[in-house]
Image (tube, grey):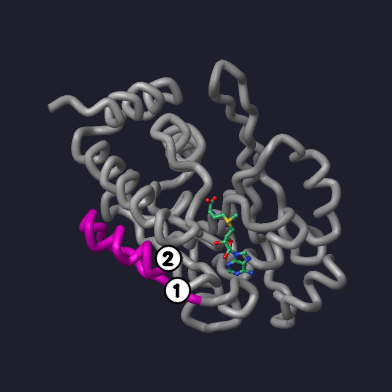
Amino acid sequence: MKSDFKELLREEAKKINIELNEDELEKFEKYKKLLVEWNEKMNLTSITEDYDVVMKHFIDSLEVVKYINEGSNIIDVGTGAGFPGIVIAIYFEGKVNITLLDALNKRLIFLEEVIKNLDLKNIEIVHGRAEEMAHNENYRNKYDIVVSRAVAPLNILVEYNFAYLKLGGKCLLLKGSNVQEEIESAKKAIETLELKITNIFEYKYVYNEEEYKRYIIEIKRIKEVSNKYPRSNGKIKKSPL
Ligand code: SAM
């Protein structure tokens, strides 16, 4: 039987130059069903209609795969219900290693179920606060790529994220339209943490006949900094860099 959901996702992905095969579409559909089903028991997302899930979660998250190479070791900090981490895992089908990190355990229980149902490979789930786990030697300096969507303002987010990266590794941060302001207010943090903004990728999509502009900020780790970073959450929030 033809599935409207899969057709919709296939078409919208094509518009952003991404071809999804039948197996991937099947997995996205299962993921959407689990998201909607579990959302009745726990608060995972306010977005549950097919069209909205396709555009606001799947298409938005899929943009980031354009800047990821096969073989990368990736961490999604503040993954929530798996955006963009699960989307990356489906798209690269075991060709990347991915860690999903979140401070809220109930969301991780949902993600375990998704991983089991979709039979996703090379995924690890970590329960903890970003700024604390960044001091754990199993995760510090270990990743080629850190991704995050909708987790914190940029000046705070870079402190949460940078230490997961190997030297030369990059953050890919999915952000909304006020990107210039965010970058302005994160200047000091980026300088203090010896990071460098290397690209700002703009992308657009039409949603309910309106055009939305979104950005992926690429930030590289270029030098070592003191082990005192990231600081505790209290300090980060009280005196952001
Ligand atoms: N990335 C997902 C998305 O785009 O749908 C979730 C976004 S949700 C608004 C923010 C998520 O970040 C929540 O699941 C929250 O628990 C997590 N989060 C916020 N601060 C965090 C921190 N310091 N450490 C770990 N997770 C954090």
| Quadrant in the picture for residue 59 | top left
Mark 1 falls on what kind of element?
strand
Q: Nearer the viewer, residue 211 or 97?
A: 211
**Residue 193 place in picture, x, y as percent:** 75, 66
Which residue appears at 45% of the width and 25% of the height? 16
Q: In this orientation, does residue 92 appear?
A: no
Magenta residue check for 118:
yes
Q: Quadrant of the C terminus?
A: bottom right
Q: Are marks 1 and 2 in contact (CB under 8 Å)?
A: yes
> Which quadrant contains ligand 1?
bottom right
Magenta residue check for 230:
no
Q: Nearer the viewer, residue 157 or 163?
A: 157
Q: Is 231 displayed left or right of 105 in the figure?
A: right
Seen in the picture, residue 89 relative to 143 is either above or below; the reply is above
Mark 2 falls on what kind of element?
strand
Q: Quadrant of the N terminus?
A: top left
Which residue appears at 54% of the width and 24% of the height? 207
Residue picked out by circle 2? 99
Q: Which residues are magenta?
A: 108-127
Q: CA distance from mark 1 to mark 2?
A: 7 Å
Residue picked out by circle 1? 126
**Residue 140 place in picture, x, y as percent:** 55, 76
- How many residues crowd around disc 1 within 10 Å: few (fewer than 14), some, or many (20 or more)? some
| Quadrant in the picture for residue 106 | bottom left
| Quadrant in the picture for residue 24 | top left
Q: Which amino acid is tagged 1?
A: Val
